Amino acid sequence: MQRPSFVRFAALALAAVVTTAAQAQAPVLNLYSARHYQTDEALYENFTKATGIRINRVDADDAGVVARLQSEGQNSPADVVLLVDAARLWRAETQGLFQPVKSRVLEERIPATLRSDDDGQGSQWFGFSTRARVIVYDKTRVQRADVDTYEKLGAPVNKGRVCTRSGSHPYNLSLFGAMLEHLGPQKTEAWLRGIVDNMARPPKGGDTDQIKAVASGECAVALTNSYYLARMMRSQNPADQQVVERIAVVFPDQATTGTHVNIAGGAVARYAKNREAAVRFLEYLASADAQSYFANGNNEWPAVPGVKPRNPALESFGSFKTESVPVSAIGRNQVKVQQMLDRVGYR
């Protein structure tokens, strides 16, 4: 009577060994990611199901990912790099951390404005989702006309009203780098000084904290990335719903240059050992299904034209004009902008 049990045990043990051996031989893609969103888990799982390629992920913020790539050099196991700021992608490219990719799939699906320049060898990075840098305001205290451009954040009408996170945060540096292209150095520095003069309190916290500060009355105007606001709009938490009811949002500069838009994007690491799998993963991110996970999961807009976000918060924003400043220009401007921030006392 015990023999069948032994046989079953032996069979299960053998199956476990076979499964472990198969997993060990399965292709592995090493992903260094600055994206920390739970919804991305389904994205990675679906890629593995479709291709058989397992993903080994290392998480850090943009700066941490770049620092790790630099320290590891040619010994880095990274195959794919995901970053969440266009200027960071540009800087990593200039530091030689990526390699060019020539892919008809990516060239056909990702607009040229959302990927690095192609010097004939291919692009070094590709944007897969976009987010807008918007202004939120207390609709009980502020008129929309007082905050319908970025420049008005530094205008006297907003004295004592403004909240932001650190001026040196990549999201702000990218916006300020774009403004330097629009305004030139003298006007940009004067604008930044005006924002500092208009602060309701010193810069602190993240974008969600700025939204809550407006709703609480700590300030009346703030900068935030659109996906932070969309996340609160979709929240079932009564406290978040109360915040959303108190504020309004404006997409700045619709009559002129357009709203500043940033991207999350990916690249093949310079020393990728699994280049074929890495390119395949980037092409997968450009698929319609992946775009839905990549964009909608974090309340961003898909990068691929024609892919519609199934997201009520994004739909409520409607369509808007976006600026067309080259990412390379924004990246080059960041050193100058940081010097301006130091001079005007923007922490």
Image (cartoon, helix red, strand yellow):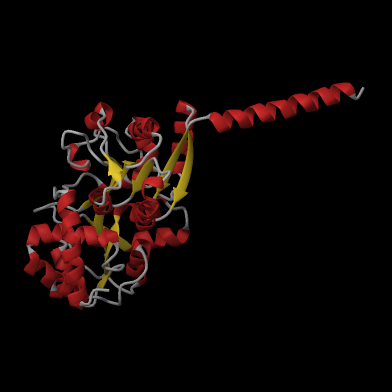
Residue that appears at 33% across and 66% down: 210
Q: Can the viewer see residue 252 in this picture?
A: no
Question: Of 164 and 35, which appears nearest the observer?
Answer: 35
- On screen, 227 above or below 294? below
- The N terminus lies in quadrant: top right
Residue that appears at 40% across and 39% down: 293
Where residue 17 appears, as percent x and y from the top left, is 67, 30
Where residue 199 appears, as percent x and y from the top left, is 24, 75
Question: Of 67 and 253, which appears nearest the observer?
Answer: 67
Residue that appears at 21% across and 42% down: 116
- On screen, 277 above or below 213? above
Residue that appears at 32% across and 46% down: 300
Where residue 11 appears, as percent x and y from the top left, is 75, 24
Q: Is residue 92 left or right of residue 260?
A: right
Q: Is residue 246 left or right of residue 50?
A: left
Q: How many marks?
A: 0
Residue sticking out furthest to the front: 74
Question: Of 91 and 46, which appears nearest the observer?
Answer: 91
- On screen, 197 above or below 13? below
Where residue 231 appears, as percent x and y from the top left, is 39, 52
Question: Of 2 and 254, which appears nearest the observer?
Answer: 2
- The C terminus lies in quadrant: bottom left
Q: Can the viewer see residue 273 in this picture?
A: yes
